Amino acid sequence: AQSVTQLDSQVPVFEEAPVELRCNYSSSVSVYLFWYVQYPNQGLQLLLKYLSGSTLVKGINGFEAEFNKSQTSFHLRKPSVHISDTAEYFCAGFDGNKLVFGAGTILRVKS
Amino acid sequence: GAGVSQSPRYKVAKRGQDVALRCDPISGHVSLFWYQQALGQGPEFLTYFQNEAQLDKSGLPSDRFFAERPEGSVSTLKIQRTQQEDSAVYLCASSLQSGDVQTQYFGPGTRLLVL
């Protein structure tokens, strides 16, 4: 069964600094990975997904993630964050018909 | 509508009451999912429908939880005799097709508080 681990519960960062949110997965079958963002009192919005092909995936709002099979990781990165990026970010894997989520990482962007 | 909608957005229930949560998926979406998100945690799968058929209910925590999608569109999640541990945000998601990996689109959720 798929499981997903997000190593950091909170990541504080100053505006315009780069950020990396870490995600590791375990799976014995095909790997499909996603990053979602959740703003306060809102549902989940898809940032990006990896299904196959290029290991570097670009998403919305300037985010990108790299699938690394040898390290079983799918870390999310942004070279320069904005205040508006403050939100909770969830990494998820696909297991059968359902998504399996990590516990989430709260990104706090400070001015 | 353009996205997945859920109602009510907030629900306060006394312990022991029954509640019903509604989900309107994106029009034409075949698959519908319910997830439960406890405070400070990631969403956890509850159940999955393909059209009106409930194909997976392995995540429902007890027989007090029941979901239906009788006409293959709107779905209702019902919780009987609510308990305090049922307090959570209930998220609904839909996707266009089934079988292949499809992007799931989420609604805003229903925040349930059981007192």
Image (cartoon, coloured by chain):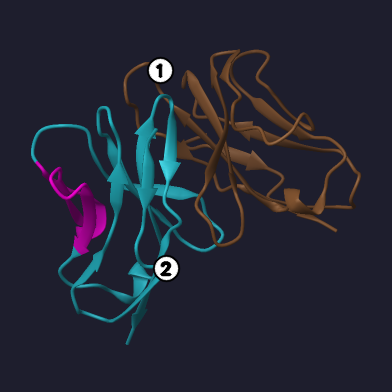
- Dot 2 corresponds to which residue? A9
Q: Residue B88: x percent and y percent?
A: 67, 52
Q: Chain of mark 1?
A: B
Chain drawn in cyan: A
Residue drawn at 61 percent across, 24 percent down:
B57
- Tag in front: 1 or 2: 2
Q: Which residues are magenta?
A: A55-77
The x, y position of residue A95, in whole percent, is 39, 30
User: Which three-letter amino acid code belongs to the residue tagged 1?
Assistant: Ser
Apparent side of residue B52 relative to residue A20 in the rendered image (left or right): right
Residue at x 20% of width, y 79% of height:
A16
Question: Residue sitting at 19 percent across and 59 percent down?
Answer: A62
- From this view, report whether residue B12 is shown above or below residue B1: below
Element at label 1: loop
Location of residue B81 by image quarter = top right
Position of the C terminus of chain A by quadrant: bottom left
Q: Which mark is residue B98?
A: 1
Locate the N terminus of chain A and report the quarter of the image it occupies. Answer: top left
The brown one among the chains is B
A90 lies above or below A82: above
Residue at left offset 25%, top offset 28%: A30
Q: B94 and B79: which one is in front?
A: B79
Q: Is residue B100 left or right of residue A65?
A: right
Question: What number is the disc on residue A15?
Answer: none
Position of B79 with respect to B33 (left or right) is: right
